[in-house]
Image: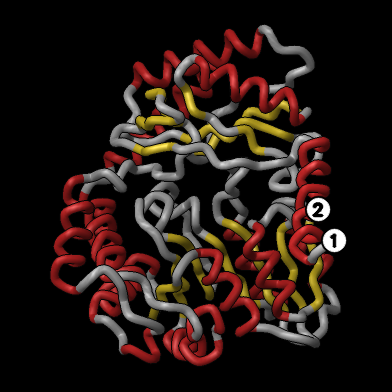
Amino acid sequence: MTSFERLNAYAEQKLAQLEASGQRRSLTETAREAGGRAVRAGSHVISFCDNDYLSLSHDPRVMQAAADAALKFGAGSGGSRLITGNHPLNSALEARLAALKGTEGARVFGSGFLANLGTIPALVGKGDTIVMDELAHACMHGGARLSGAEMRLFRHNDVADAARLLEGAPGQALLLTETVFSMDGDVAPLSELGVLAERTGAWLMTDDAHGLGITKQDNPAQIQMGTLSKAVGGYGGYVCGPAALMELLTSRARSFVYTTGLPPSVLAAAIASLDIIQAEPERTAKARRHAALFCELMGLPVPSSVIVPIIIGPEAEAMRVSGALLERGYLVTAIRPPTVPAGTARLRVTFASGHEEADIRAFAGALKDIMEQACAVTL
């Protein structure tokens, strides 16, 4: 057997195992459109699994800003910001983000994932301690592992458990959490975690990927990261904090130093989106009203964000419900382990300002009808 054949056989074996466990993923051609619409496998659908919460990715002003920047500055950045130079749009976007977050400075990264992979190892290392919410995003876990620091996971949103784990923590302690949790839509107890960090000398770092533009929480964290790919509607990540820390990241965050800078069109689109978010708060209000209406129609608690989980449990059943919704014209992808804990496969339903009230009511009706036909489903 040749090396190619061995590799192919290995991949096929792994795929068969994923198939048997219900965890094999596949790509489906989908073209997103304005107003929460999309064309999936040739069929027109309404998407309720999109992170474009404020429907800015298709706002004509944002698209025009991207087009103008591409025509003026080119399609790409040419290389790392430290090699080819720092495009002025980077500085403009970073100044806007720092002002928004109330920090001394900001650094833009290629993505939120890269921001966490680079920032956490630049802050702590071997001999230090990371105390992290057990449900923090995979990129926080990835950055923590890369750092070499001792990892301690506290029970979700349990400040007392975090305090217990911080006791006797060696070296510098870094306390990590999300502001809005991506799979459950609940919010972190930021004030309490801030008090805990001050009392113990830990540094608090938050991931605001799903909170920016959606929730307004006082955030005491010294280090605040997030993304430009959710409510901002584009792409990229950022870290905000003290000016000296931003300079340190410029030299020590490997995912910044060794990564090509974002294209000018992406930077310009983000700046335009942030302008709109600040000028048009009704977008946020509308998206939150949609989430609240859905929960009211489904008999669910009032949501903390625009993310509403429908816990199904078995992976096969979650896939069945998702498929049944797609047949009725609604795109809600089933979320399965390892993204969520075993036994908690779910529909992660998200709401956007581009949806209309009629969309919410029709979707809730379709979901209730499908769920009534399902067995052993827990809302």
Q: Secondary structure at mark 2?
A: helix
Q: Quadrant of residue 278?
A: bottom left
Q: Amino acid at mark 2?
A: Ala
Amino acid of disc 1: Met
Residue behind mark 2: 9
Looking at the image, residue 298 lies above or below residue 266? above
- The residue that appears at 39% across and 80% down in the rendered structure is 105
Mark found first going from the N terminus, 1 or 2:
1
Q: Which mark is residue 199?
A: none
Out of 253 and 154, give the one closest to the viewer.
Answer: 253
Answer left or right for 145 relative to 65.
Answer: right
- Can you say which quadrant of the picture contains the N terminus? bottom right
**Does the residue at mark 1 contact the one at mark 2 (Cβ under 8 Å)?**
yes
Q: Secondary structure at mark 1?
A: loop
Query: x, y percentage for residue 163?
Result: 78, 66
Task: Where is residue 359? Give x, y as percent.
Answer: 38, 20
- Quadrant where the image shows the C terminus: top right
Count of labels shown? 2
Question: Is 67 or 280 nearer to us in this picture?
Answer: 67
Q: Is residue 100 above or below residue 306?
A: below
Q: Residue at the spot x=56%, y=16% of the render?
A: 367
| Residue wearing tag 1 | 1
Q: Position of residue 171 (x, y in %)?
A: 77, 87
Outermost front residue? 1
**Crowd tier of the residue under label 2, counting other residues whose Cα lies within 10 Å: few below 14, some 14–19, many 20 or above:** few
Q: Residue at x 34, y 29 (%)?
A: 355
